[in-house]
Amino acid sequence: MNRRKQPGGGFWQAPACVLGALVVTYLVFAGPWGCSPEDSSWETAQASAQRSEATTEPMSTATTREAPAAPAGAETDSEASNPRAIFPAPPPEWNDREASRTGSAMGEPARQPGSEMEDSDLADPRAAAIAAAKTAWARNDAIGALDRLDPWLGEDLGADGHFVAGSALLAIEETAAARDHLERAALADPGGVAVWSTLARAHLKAQAPQLAYRAAHRALRLDRKHDPAWIALGLALLDLHRGDEALGAFESAVAIDPQNTEGWNGIGLIWLLREEFVQARAALEMAIAAPSCPAHAHNNLGLVYERLGFAEWADREYARCLELDPEHPTAALSRQRIAPFLAIRATR
């Protein structure tokens, strides 16, 4: 039987089938009964399309594309590149600044003041001894300071250590050792004003007024308002028999500190040596009115009262001097000297 080929058969049947499948797909997915953009399948399809588009896009276009703004609370690219953002926040006692210094992402525990981590020099027994000696000397505890430095007194203590050792030794009248430590402190710290003024005092106790004069001048070149240096300079000038210059130095000291007892005592002593007893009395009364008056100021005022004929007042000042310094070399002798005059007045 000879059958004629139909127009829709053969070669044209395959395209017709594909077209029908596409129509059905469109009706299923895009029709009013299909999936909406809000459905999860739609999101999945969109994500797949974006991934395929990214893989086929040229590199230059993909790297310059602007990223969409991230929703609130989402992790951004800058946060992902920051190691601190993806790790839990460090506890309060951790120090972020130390972390940035060391390069550690999480930082290091904060160093507490006075701890071994911060004050690493305290790990050295000698450094710890110097620190303890400085604390003791700040309380005017010369013996305590020397006890802490004793194992290292023959070694290099640095500027601070030698200064504390020299000052403490000077306070207990070990002048030679004090001068040695203070000279080493001055070499280690040529800019230390207190070092030079204390060294000047040590030279004065060693009866070396010329060296004291030089050390005091060195201190005053560093700080013209350092009144202890003016006192040391005045005493050195007094020992060098340069009374007018010494008077000017003491007056400079009390101009800086009106309650400087050593300054008023020096002024009174110069007037006493010149037998100007009224001026001496005025200056020495200022000296004993100031806090922490030294014993020798009371002795000098007693001498002035004695010259002015006030034996009872003189005896009172000598007694006060001996209360402060029981080993004062002349106060006891002065009381014995005026005792007969007091006995005569007592019988009247």
Image: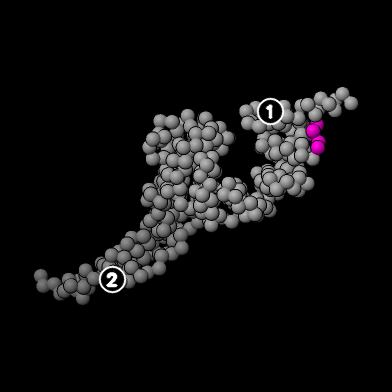
Q: Which residue is mark 2?
A: 58
Please, what is the dominant secondary structure of the magenta stretch?
A: helix
User: Is tag 1's residue or tag 2's residue first in the polypeptide sequence?
Assistant: 2
Residue in the image at 38% along x and 40% along y: 156
Q: Which residue is mark 1?
A: 332
Question: What is the span of residues highlighted in magenta in the rendered image?
Answer: 309-313
Helix, strand or loop at mark 1: helix
Residue type for callout 1: Ala
Q: Nearer the viewer, residue 3 or 17?
A: 17
Residue ranking furthest to the right: 348
Q: Nearer the viewer, residue 166 or 274?
A: 274
Residue 229 showing in the rendered view = no
Q: How many marks?
A: 2
Check if residue 80 falls in the magenta segment: no
Q: Residues within 10 Å of mark 2 (few under 14, many from 20)?
A: few
User: Does 41 sit above or below residue 286?
Assistant: below
Residue in the image at 44% along x and 40% along y: 180
Residue in the image at 19% along x and 71% along y: 9
Q: Which image quadrant for residue 40?
A: bottom left
Residue in the image at 73% along x and 46% along y: 275
Of discs 1 and 2, which sits in the foreground? 1
Q: Is residue 193 left or right of residue 88?
A: right
Q: Nearer the viewer, residue 156 or 323?
A: 323
